[in-house]
Amino acid sequence: MVTSRSCPIVDAGLAGITAGTLLQTQGWRVWLLDKGRAPGGRMATRRIGEAALTMARSS
Ligand SMILES: Cc1cc2nc3c(=O)[nH]c(=O)nc-3n(C[C@H](O)[C@H](O)[C@H](O)COP(=O)(O)OP(=O)(O)OC[C@H]3O[C@@H](n4cnc5c(N)ncnc54)[C@H](O)[C@@H]3O)c2cc1C
């Protein structure tokens, strides 16, 4: 249901997830929309068979 305090965010990467989390703490209802198959954007984990490859991580 769309309310006056609801907001779609087109980006389920780091920026969108962060924005959505902050908005939710302020009482907003948030939808994350993304063209990808899974959340995470450039930080998403790619799975190839048994292998899992996380593209962007600092450690
Ligand atoms: C190999 C690699 C290593 C990295 N290492 C580091 C590191 O060590 N430290 C660090 O701080 N940063 C690192 N980064 C950068 C970091 O991953 C990015 O800065 C960060 O993930 C960007 O987040 P974002 O949400 O801005 O964008 P993205 O992660 O790109 O997310 C954007 C999302 O929006 C979606 N989207 C785009 N257009 C549309 C559309 N029209 N409709 C629907 N969905 C759409 C995409 O599918 C994507 O999921 C690295 C990046 C890479 C690729």
Image (cartoon, rainbow, N blue to C red):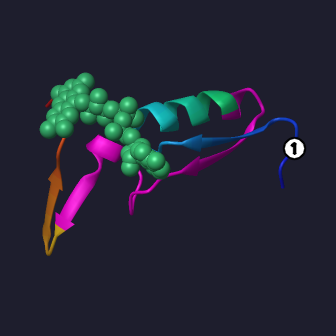
Q: Position of residue 38 (x, y in %)?
A: 39, 59
Q: Position of residue 30 (x, y in %)?
A: 68, 43
For residue 52, above or below residue 26: below
Q: Residue at x 59, y 36 (%)?
A: 20
Q: Quadrant of ligand 1?
A: top left
Verify whether residue 57 appears in magenta.
Answer: no
Q: Residue at x 45, y 31 (%)?
A: 15
Nearest the eye: 5 or 26:
5
Q: Position of residue 17 (x, y in %)?
A: 50, 38
**How many numbered discs?**
1
For residue 7, above or below residue 18: below
Quadrant (top left/top right/bottom left/bottom right) for the N terminus: bottom right
Q: Within the image, what quadrant is residue 27 found in? A: top right
- Disc 1: residue Cβ within 8 A of ligand 1's nearest atom: no
Q: Position of residue 33 (x, y in %)?
A: 55, 51
Q: Which residues are magenta?
A: 24-47
52 to the left or right of 38 = left
Nearest the eye: 24 or 10:
10
Q: Residue at x 59, y 34 (%)?
A: 21
Verify whether residue 45 appears in magenta.
Answer: yes
Q: Is residue 32 visible?
A: yes
Q: From this viewpoint, which residue is outermost toward the right?
A: 4
Q: Is residue 57 visible?
A: no
Quadrant (top left/top right/bottom left/bottom right) for the C terminus: top left
Q: Residues within 10 Å of mark 1 (few under 14, many from 20)?
A: few
Q: Which residue is under mark 1?
A: 3
Nearest the eye: 26 or 42:
42
For residue 10, above or below residue 26: below
21 to the left or right of 46 = right
- Amino acid type, callout 1: Thr
Q: Residue at x 13, y 73 (%)?
A: 50
Secondary structure of the residue carrying tag 1 is loop
